[in-house]
Image (spheres, rainbow, N blue to C red):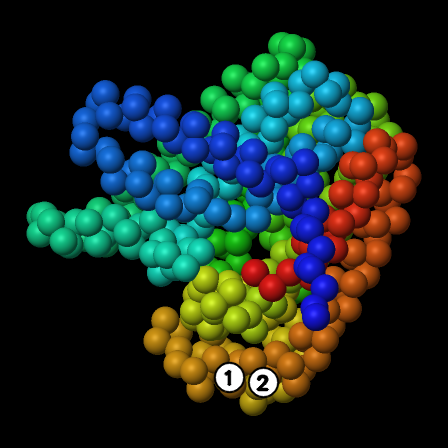
Amino acid sequence: MTSAKPPSPLDAADLRTRVQVVVDGVIAHQSHVLAGVSDDLTPMVEALRALLAGGKRLRPAFCYWGWRGAGGDPAHDDAALRAAASLEFLQACALIHDDVMDGSDTRRGLPAAHRRFAGVHRGAEWLGSPEDFGVGAAILLGDLCLSWADEVLLTAEFPDDALRRAKTVYDEMRTELMAGQYLDLLEQARGGGSVERALRVVRYKSAKYTIERPLHVGAALAGAGRDVFAAYTGYGLPLGEAFQLRDDILGVFGDPIETGKPAGDDLREGKRTVLIAIAVERSTPVQAEVIRRHLGDPGLDANGVDALREIIAATGALAHTETLIGDLLNQSLAALGTAELEPQAHEVLTGLAYAATRRTV
């Protein structure tokens, strides 16, 4: 007899289910608003509903438990959950736009938004380029999500001063995210560079926006002191970097059934990750030529994927990245103990640290 799988920290306080309820409610409301404009907008709602039908809900979890950890008033629990759920719409914006910039075909096992819209155009035999239509529609859907993220946050039932504090952090988080996204584009255009530059992209495109800033939004809503913000930075930044490094490994070595993306898709897209930067830095001239020839090839086949995987392993890049993840996790957990947090939140945040770095999807 096998023992039951332990509950995920992401499900503590029934968070994922409650976030889904908020997300579904927002989409239903916005669907009604868009229907008042034109029934032709229905495909946009359907695309977003499909994208947000699942997911880890990491950002809402860090926001909510950041609020709880900072002593958030239980009377505002539903409001905190709504504020946290706003991050799902910001994440949707980031994913939709990121897939456009990377030319990704799939997201969570489904066609990426721009591919979905291109298919609508192609199926209806409309004029012009299906691909251009798909990109344009996806950009607009991402913009809508960015707008709705603000709306969801600012309609959470908190006192005005709490919302102002949170909005200040929220605005800074969005600026950092867009800056990191540009730096990522720049690295790909330059053909990649040092490990240090790749880590800078990780920090601003992913680490801060995934963990540190959601924690800070929660802390701001709770009116936390500087010690809590400092502890959340010490915990959130290294953990966010470790989370992205795990994502980079999964993008090359992950199981497509679990990741929802084709095997080696990051290699076809030519992503200049820390994993790749380490491999390039440690490669022989022959290995470097194989990387140069295959990385970013949209038609990369299974043999090409295997060749790049072998080089990443042979150079020690994979093992070194795993070591970095472990070191960053330890830094994160040590920092969590530097502030006095509500006990259950401390326990859940500890569990979330392991969930974020040991995941398979």
Placement of the N terminus among the 4 image quadrants: bottom right
- Residue 333 vs 1, above or below: the answer is above
- Residue 211 vs 229, above or below: the answer is below
Q: Position of residue 94 (x, y in %)?
A: 47, 43
Residue 185 relative to residue 216: left or right: left
Residue 62 relative to residue 122: left or right: right
Question: Circle 1 — which element?
Answer: helix
- Residue 278 vs 354, above or below: the answer is below
Residue at image point 71% right, 55% down: 6
Residue at image point 55% right, 23% down: 153
Given the image, on which type of amino acid does mark 1 rest?
Asp
Given the image, on which type of amino acid does mark 2 rest?
Glu
Q: Position of residue 341 (x, y in %)?
A: 85, 33
Residue 221 showing in the rendered view? yes
Question: Circle 2 — which element?
Answer: helix
Residue at image point 53% right, 54% down: 184
For disc 2, the neighbor class at 10 Å (few under 14, some 14 to 19, many from 20) is few
Placement of the C terminus among the 4 image quadrants: bottom right
- Residue 256 vs 45, above or below: the answer is below
Residue at the bottom extreme of this rendering = 286
* Occupied quadrant, residue 110: bottom left
Q: Which residue is mark 1?
A: 306
Q: Which residue is mark 2?
A: 310
Are discs 2 and 1 less than 8 Å apart at CB?
yes
For disc 1, the neighbor class at 10 Å (few under 14, some 14 to 19, many from 20) is some
Residue 271 showing in the rendered view? no
Residue 18 relative to residue 233: left or right: left
Disc 2 from disc 1: Cα separation: 6 Å
* The disc label shown at residue 6, or none: none
Count the numbered circles shown. Answer: 2
Residue 121 relative to residue 192: left or right: left
